[in-house]
Amino acid sequence: MTEQHRFEQYDALIFDMDGTLVDSMPLHLDAWEQTSAEFGLPFDRAQLNEYGGIPTRKIVAMLAEQHGLAIDVEAFARRKVALYLEHIDKVSVFPAMWELVKGCHGKVPMGIGTGSTRAHAAHILRQTGLDAFIPVLVSADDVVNHKPHPDTFLKVAEQLGAKPANCLVFEDTPIGLEAGRAAGMETLLVHQGALCPR
């Protein structure tokens, strides 16, 4: 059975965006590194990569509390986002994921569940051409409880008219995988745009 046929058994395929479908994580992390230096927040690239899927404001508040620092969360988030947006047009789709999306298009409903804002996610989808293949987008703006809560993925399934138990989630972080499992969905780890064996 080919990969493609294996995916056709699902009601829906649900993708995280940053680090799973597109190679945007290094750009996010570079922006984090520069902003952290400016605001005096200790920076740990590996730790921040693990937090993929959680909105910037929530991460800043969490880290400030961990380090006992008083940081203007809104000012930090604005600066980090501005630095990221300077490079957003460099984002591209991982080749293996492009192949998967194109191969499943028209055969299995697909959606995206991301911790990015709707504006940033929609921009990336338009700029890369993914918007022509994946019609449903649930962003950080569309839910109150972000990953590791299941709400993002459940909302994608609902919009696709899919049963959560028969959805497959593609994710690149432990927090994202936890969200998929909490939604009662099957999960598949993606590393640098490549599917990891189960």
Image (spheres, helix red, strand yellow):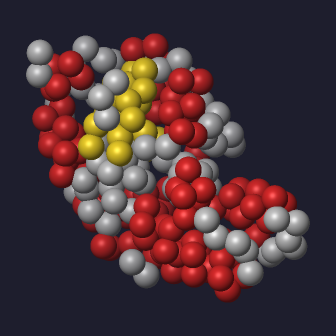
Query: Residue 35 sits in which quadrant?
Result: bottom right
Residue 146 left/right relative to 110: right
Residue 52 left/right relative to 70: left
In the image shown, does 107 or 48 lie closer to the viewer? 48
The residue lying at 54 percent from left, 58 percent from top is 46
Residue 98 left/right relative to 13: left
Number of numbered callouts drawn: 0
Residue 37 left/right relative to 49: right
- Asked whether the viewer can see residue 194, the reply is yes
The residue lying at 60 percent from left, 56 percent from top is 47
x, y (%) of residue 137?
42, 44
Position of 138 relative to 1 (above/below): below
x, y (%) of residue 163?
44, 15
- Asked whether the viewer can see residue 151, the reply is no
For the N terminus, the quadrant is top left
In the image shown, does 59 or 57 lie closer to the viewer? 59
Position of 155 relative to 64 (above/below): above
x, y (%) of residue 39?
72, 82
The residue lying at 57 percent from left, 40 percent from top is 175
Query: Residue 4 sits in which quadrant?
Result: top left
The residue lying at 34 percent from left, 24 percent from top is 198
x, y (%) of residue 24?
39, 62
Query: Residue 110 sits in which quadrant?
Result: top left
In the image shown, does 127 or 9 lie closer to the viewer? 9
